[in-house]
Image (cartoon, coloured by chain):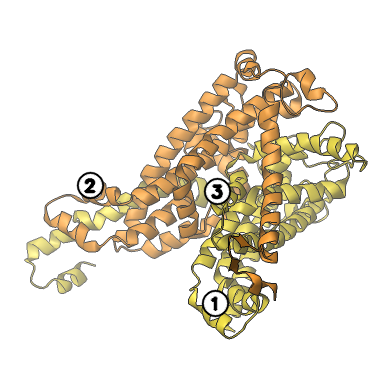
Chain colours: A orange, B yellow
Amino acid sequence: MSTSTWTSTGHWRTPTLGLVIRYTVLVATTLVILIPLVWTLLSSFKTEVELAARPPRPLPAQWNLDNYTGALESFAFGTYLMNSTIVTVAATILTLVINTMCAYGLAKYNFRGRNLLFLLVLATIMVPLQVILISVYQVAAQLGLVNSLLGMIIPPAATPTGVFLLRQYMLSIPDELIEASRIDGAGEFRTFLQVVVPLCGAPIAVVTIFSIMWRWNDFLWPLIIAQDQSKYTLPVALAQFNSQLVVPFNYILAMSVVSMLPVIAMFLFLQRYIVLGIANSGLK
Amino acid sequence: MLPADTLAAPTAAPTRSRRRWLSPIKIAPYLFVLPNMIVFGLFTIWPAINMFNISLYDSTNGRTFRWVGFQNYAELTSNQAFLRAFTSTLVFTVAFVVLTTILATGYAILLNQSFRGRGFFRAVLFLPSLLSAVVVGLLWGWILNRTNGLLNVGLDAVGLGQPGWLIDGRLAMVVIIFVGLWIHVGFYTLIMLSGLQGIDPSVYEAAAIDGASPTQQFLSMTWPLLRPTTLVVVILATISGFQSFDFIWTLTGGGPVGATTLMVQYIYERAFESPIRYGLASAGGVILFICVFGFTLLNYLNGRRQDAA
């Protein structure tokens, strides 16, 4: 009933009940999401003594990077950061190469078993690594991939989501373009590389972003593969050291911020693609 | 294959049609899918099959295996720790899926129309799903610490006491559901939002002319038209709920005394922490898979039935 009062009378518009509810809910949600994150960021500059102070002060006494440099110098966080970076970059490149090729094969050729392969890829969205953990580990062990960065890079690379996203997009590329390239005498692989790939900028960006997010935040698989501390990735190191209480908590906080910054930065710059990717696939 | 090809191209010279079935265009698709399928086969398809095989053996070291048939499954049905993890997983997943669907629909409706600050709220809501779940769990564990955590310091200051968020088993279950929602709701909201934006605005105009109230509009139009998107959200949330592990590991560690140990953690611990029981853990994995598959199929068939109705 009150919705009919939603009229503009002069400069002042009466806020409707709906509008009040909308802003109340959204502002409250924003606080629930941002307070822990802002509190973490502020606390990452505090000393251990300040962290234990009661009542806690919101702002650190001194703004310096001691916790950040301390964690890198006193503990091997530099190594873990490097491992995380190597795994993320290498796995993303591998995923892009094999997913794009596979998607092209499934989208633009007619061959025996094509539909079966595509269904198989789709079905495994229901079989996450967490479920088949043990037998994947067995394969990795037999191939000598345990306790190596390669063991974190290769096994999760053939993402079903990536194949699906890229294939759906490639279906919309006109066959005439590919046919024309063939008539021009380009081989199959050159057609793929020089005609198809340049047209797939948007879905490739989406898969790149997703892959970076997945691999940078990956935990269970690297936890199993990394048996020496020297092979830890950042999330593995944070989880292990936090539970064993070996690293001061102010260092843990600083490194938590480091683990969150790259993905937040990526989101700020590439938000458009992320929203696009989710809207188009409904898949994570 | 060869005769069919020759028939299909009767004008081609015989020599050419002979070469055609080995032509690049015939081999190319296999070469394109091959690298992905090798990785996929080695690390997804084969392990999925082999897990069932391993579940029929007993092994305490992962090297020597003794055939025991279905004994692992029989043992699991009377194993208190497993049964508890199984029940907790169902409780967690059902709560997570139901609340995710409701909240994502609600937020999507709030964010559907354009208003000041919409882009900001949408970005904030999505932000947690980008972050490392391990780190999120760790931070919430710190904030919910009974004596030193930010929340209880605040509650204590206003005289509300210091609830043992992570010490009381029931509260801890509520906490992991809450943190699960905190992480994931924004992602599902975006899916719902894309579904909402696919609805033709003219149906609302027509309904408004006919005098339908907002509640009537929601129940008789938005909700039915959103059903396919809701189905996607329910299925994805179910899969995500069943595989929850990372944030719980750093938030509660599965405690207190196993109250928040879900199936993935049970499987992980029986496979990689002493006492190692490979076969038992694999049997747990098979049961988890059956749960994921069963629920997904149920949702899918239910969605299809409603669409047909």
- Residue topped by disc 2: A194
Task: Identify which residue, A165 or B275, lies in the foreground.
Answer: A165
- Mark whose residue sits in front, 1 or 2: 1
**Residue at 75 percent of width and 34 percent of height:** B274
Total numbered labels placed on residues in the image: 3
In which quadrant is the N terminus of chain B drawn?
Answer: bottom left
| Residue B47's disc number | 3
**Residue at 20 percent of width and 58 percent of height:** A177
3D distance between C-alphas at marks 2 and 3:
36 Å
- Residue topped by disc 1: B204
**Residue at 43 percent of width and 56 percent of height:** A164
> Relative to A124, is A41 above or below?
above
Which chain is indicated by disc 2? A
Which chain is indicated by disc 3? B
> Relative to A58, is B228 above or below?
below
In which quadrant is the C terminus of chain B drawn?
Answer: bottom right
Give x and y (percent) for residue A265.
51, 36
Give x and y (percent) for residue B84.
82, 52
Q: Is residue A146 left or right of residue B167?
A: left
Quick check: do tags 1 and 2 share a chain? no
Give x and y (percent) for residue A4.
64, 74
Residue type indicated by callout 2: Gln
Residue type indicated by callout 1: Tyr
Name the quadrant containing residue A18. bottom right
Quick check: do tags 1 and 3 share a chain? yes
